[in-house]
Amino acid sequence: MNIPHISGKKSGQSSHMTRRHLLGAFAASAVTAAPTFSKAASFLRGAGDVRRIAMYSGRTGETINSIYWLEGEYIREALNEVNYFMRDWRIDTATTIDTRTIDIMAASHSLLDISEPYLLLSGYRSPQTNALLRSRSRGVARNSLHMRGQAADLRLKSRSVNQMFRAAMACNAGGVGKYSGSNFVHMDCGVVRNWGS
């Protein structure tokens, strides 16, 4: 995608639009996203000046399709929206989602070359929710990175778990778990590692 260059100004006007105006201008455009990790530097080259995240939640019925990084800077308003969207819906509590995790999610999505938004199964988990889920499944870690806002469990209809897993692994920027039986992929910004079948 070509990002249009904004040029020209009237007398007394700044030549730079505000981030909010640019966010609105690019809201419907497809962009390339890339992680910020040095290990994933190859994804930074050619990434352009815009990063986007698109998700929906079957639990809340909410959707988000937001440019969260523009011209080398994260957009605070957009990150606040992501924080709220990825909240623990069970107790309606949000936390700050680690931008490294958002970058991994966005870069993986870009590598899959699709427009379909992620289905977010789990973002932030409060300690109470994590304990509840641990009581129901042995696959939930006691000190889950979900409780730090550093992980997401995601699904796509148009791509297999294997395809999602390989895209996230290609970022080489955090933990990637493949849960074929439950049809989702875990992505986090922790130590580079992978697991699952």
Image: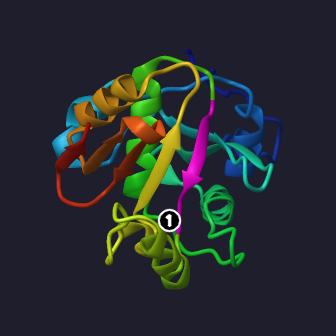
- Indicate whether 171 appears above or below 77: above
Q: In this view, does 45 lie to the left or right of 186?
A: left
The C terminus appears in which quarter of the rendering? top left
For image coordinates 68% across by 65% down, the residue present is 84
Q: Residue flagged by tag 1: what amino acid is it?
A: Ile
Q: Which of 181 and 103 is in front in this view?
A: 181
153 over 180 or under it: above or below: below
- Residue 157 location in percent, x, y? 58, 24
**Picture coordinates of residue 111 (x, y %)?**
39, 23
Question: Which quadrant would the N terminus be assigned to in this image?
Answer: top right
Q: Residue at x 82, y 41 (%)?
A: 11
Q: Nearer the viewer, residue 168 or 24?
A: 168
Q: Circle 1 — which element?
A: loop
**Front one among 4 and 185:** 185
- Residue occupied by mark 1: 97
State the extent of the magenta-drawn residues as a range: 117-124
Q: Is residue 118 magenta?
A: yes
